[in-house]
Amino acid sequence: MKKKIVSMILACSMIIGVASCKKADTTDVSDSSESSEITETTKDPNSIVGENLIKNGDFSDPELTWGTYFEGGSGELFINDKQELQFDIQKLGSVNWANQANFDGFRLYQACVYEMQFDAYATVERDVEYRIQINGSDYHPYNIDTIHVTTEVQHFDFVFTMEEETDPAPRLCLNIGFFDGYEDMGPHSVMFDNFDLQCIDDSAYLASSGNDTPMINLNQIGYLPAAEKVAVLNGDAIVDKAAVVDAATGSTVFEGSVGAASHNAATDRDEARFDFSSFTTPGTYKIVANGIESYEFAIGDDVYDEAFKATLRMFYMQRCGTELTEEYAGVHAHPECHTGEGKIYGTDTLIDVSGGWHDAGDYGRYVVPGAKAAADLMLAYTLYPDAFDDSLGIPESNNGIPDVLDEVKYELDWLFKMQAPDGGVYHKVTCVDFPGFVMPEEEQNQLFVTKQSTTATADFAAVMSMASYVYETIDADYADKCLAAAVKAAEYLDEHPDCEGAKNPMGIKTGEYPDDNDIDERLWAYAELFKATGNSMYDDKFCELMGSGIPCAADLGWQGVGAYAGYAYLSSAPTGKEYDAVLKSFTGGIDAVEKAAATDAYNSSLTTYPWGSNMSIANNAMYLLLYDNLKGGKDGDAVAREQLNYLLGTNGTGFCFLSGFGTVSPTRPHHRPSQATGVPVPGMVAGGPDESLEDPYAENVLTGTAPALCYADSDQAYSLNEITIYWNSPVVFLFAYVEVNN
């Protein structure tokens, strides 16, 4: 994932070598006490000069805040008893970044001049590549040099100007792998100390504007004529009256009162709602309040048509193992990828694992999230078949089969390959680590298949059971094949009653998708088998597990699948032995979702904002609609539609989270094909706000930001701006619902 690509040096640098055996005092880096005194007495309070940006640069604190990256190398990084950063190199590797120490947690401002200093020595003479680089995209350096370390302590000093735009989350790297002309030098150690990175000239300081958001937020794609329409105002836009203005003529076409403002804890600001639902005339408009204009939006019967298609076509764009031609993929076209056989981890056995969908921003393929995504698409088709046609614009279009089912079949065909002869299902297939930001065919490393897990096996059994009744009238032979595979997987579960969750084996660093409780997955498998076959044996198995306390409410994620189990059981027929108990459990989360939406200005159904919060928003809407389907009502309709509005712009950040749509949408998603081409694939749902700030970029940029505003459009912010197939799938479900209920 963090392959380093050397490009031109962006600023001049100098190296000064000074032998020293004494630990330097990094608090005094000035040329004289006089200059230090001037800095203290005359420093502009807005100045950024004089602060060491490398925390604990002298390693006096024993807590290690540096990370490592290995690509073919091996070693250990730690703080030694001399309070130095020590990297014990065991294996040299074949590239200079084979062994890397790295540090995050600082920022560089455009046009400012910086000085980096540190000491280094080693137990052998060797080269080290020093670099400060962008922590994403092509990982190009802002400052780079190759230094030669010896057994004597040397002091290194680099001065450079940040020529590019401000980077709030760069990375300091020390690459200690293979260099041209090297022979194996055996195990050795390299020591570093006294890191000091300071801005020494901020006269051209270009400060960031921070996390500013619009004062009027609404669905940037638009509204169906009869739909509820609400814009949320904040700041100076909060006034008594607001207007709907024709975007072309500037004339006011509707004016109404703004609701009373109230404080929203999720955004930490006062907000007010402007309801213009009674205005239904098709066209393109803006909201204007106190002279402040919103982004444009449309009203019309077809406002969601293109967005719906793009959200579903995203799955075609994620296909693995096949050529994506320019006809269908445009600038993201690429030849076949990942066609080599996968090695079952810990063995020499190779199996065919080609096909399926790339899971997310990387090129791994994982059974558990793939099952969720396939299930969502099949549920959407089952409940709203009229929303789908055979003209999506994929190779299978116009074959007489709804394209959504062609797309799901592409994933199912790969899932078949992940089932072992004993019925168990391998958890995932990836390389040992994430690739660089390259197109998929450029990831050429050996694929590894990790061991079977009961979570993957149960999810497999569930979606194959679903497929058996979804495809029954489309392809009876295929449906029979799916059911046979599901039965075999269920037999494996019976033979493995204990949870066998997934843990990354040694050396594998890709997504783990761990789960230490498989009761909900087993419930889902047995419920779907009961629905598919009517066999009371599966009802009995389901009922045996119901006493475990696993709820069948609201959980529509990859780790918690209880609501899938509950819906499958309840929709099979009211003949199951535990129907009433399951119904009570399934409805247990409805009140919480509706209460959260009712108390938020944006009708967000969340009270906290976790990683992938946009999936949670979409899942909650889907949950309400599944309940409506069971009860034959439309109680959840309004809240579900508001969750779609949230995703399309009616949220505190002011982003339409669907790439390529709306006025402001993600332009730098953490998604390798988008980064490699420089063009975001349209129709991808970004992860959204994550109040836990779980990547260096997010932590640097958003610390202190209100939970619902913790979002940034950056490919470095993988906890905020990555995409996944299972974030898109519930949004496809929502679009399908709206398409047939307009």
Image: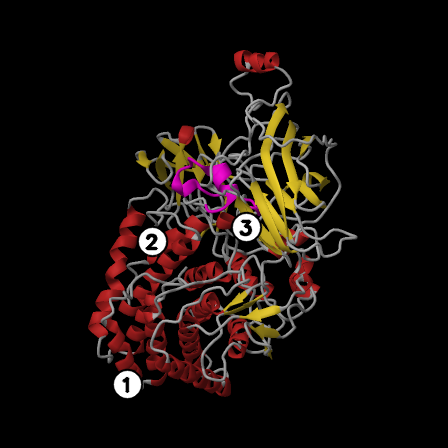
- Tell whether position 699 is magenta: yes
Residue 530 quadrant: bottom left
Q: Residue at x 27, y 50 (%)?
A: 595
**Residue beneath label 1, please?**
536
For residue 354, say whether it is visible: no
Q: Which residues are magenta?
A: 694-716
Please say if 271 is above or below 642: above
Residue 678 appears at what percent x and percent y? 66, 50
Residue type at mark 3 is: Phe
Please say if 146 is above or below 511: above
- Tell whether position 496 is magenta: no
The foreground one among 289 and 572 is 572
Few, some or many residues within 10 Å of mark 1 (<14, 14–19, 20+): some
Q: Nearer the viewer, mark 1 or mark 2?
A: 1
Few, some or many residues within 10 Å of mark 3 (<14, 14–19, 20+): many
- Quarter placement of the N terminus: bottom right
Residue 638 appears at what percent x and percent y? 33, 54
Q: What is the basis of the colouring in this image?
A: secondary structure
**Residue beneath label 2, please?**
639
**Residue beneath label 3, please?**
661
The foreground one among 427 and 180 is 180
Residue type at mark 2 is: Val
Residue 92 appears at what percent x and percent y? 67, 55
Q: Which mark sits nearer the N-terminus, 3 or 1?
A: 1
Residue found at the far right of this picture: 181
